[in-house]
Amino acid sequence: MPYRHFAFCLGLLGAAHAGATGIAVQVQDATGKALPDTVIYIEAEGGATGGKPGAALIEQKGLKFLPMVTVVQTGATINFPNNDKVRHHIYSFSPAHKFDQKLYSGQAASPQVFDTAGTVVLGCNIHDKMIAYVKIVDTPYFAKTDGAGAVRIDLPAGGRYVVKAWHYNTVGGA
């Protein structure tokens, strides 16, 4: 995987509602091109976490995983519906979450709980070109950049935070 440099520009936003603030991030690659699908996550200094892990959906459609990049909080559940007319056999050998879901179609696959922070690469044993990424973070403050490389994340006011970024084309990531 080639290494790609990227830079991000941060902007603090005024309070959207009492007791809260936010941060806006614009991510570009080394040539100045917007970098969509960059995971931005913000950790409170001192490691304090909070929030409740939610659920996500990564569907198989058109012989692709959609979305290709998903970010979830540690402990989140992800469902993998197969909306193709063919069966898929999805798997991950990633240390953060190893699993193997044999050939199936429709909703037959069991949801997976992603309970270790890190990066998970998904594949399909039948269709080698199918690939997706799950970034699991230990914070409730996260988002993925849009097509213009931009994102906004709400934060509680008064804290100190560390902003991190990860993109699937970087070596190692943050």
Image (cartoon, helix red, strand yellow):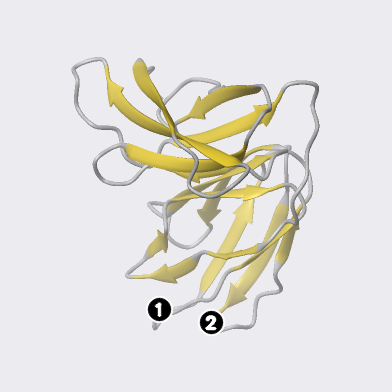
Which residue appears at 33% of the width and 30% of the height? 26
Q: Which residue is mark 2?
A: 105
Left or right, 123 with respect to 136, comes to left
Residue 63 x/y as whole percent = 36, 66
The amino acid marked with disc number 2 is Ser
Asked whether the residues under the numbered discs 1 and 2 touch, taking CB atoms below 8 Å apart as contact, a structural biologist would say yes
Q: Quadrant of residue 85?
A: bottom left
Residue 22 x/y as whole percent = 50, 37
**Secondary structure category for the residue under label 1:** loop
Q: Quadrant of residue 90?
A: bottom right
Q: Quadrant of residue 78?
A: bottom right
Which residue appears at 35% of the width and 19% of the height? 6
Query: Crowding near pointer 1: few (<14 within 10 Å), some, many (20+)?
Result: some
49 in relation to 54, above or below: above
In the rendered image, the quadrant that contains the C terminus is top right
Residue 53 x/y as whole percent = 72, 56
**Secondary structure category for the residue under label 2:** loop
Which residue appears at 59% of the width and 83% of the height? 107
The amino acid marked with disc number 1 is Asp
Sooner in the amino-acid sequence: mark 1 or mark 2:
1
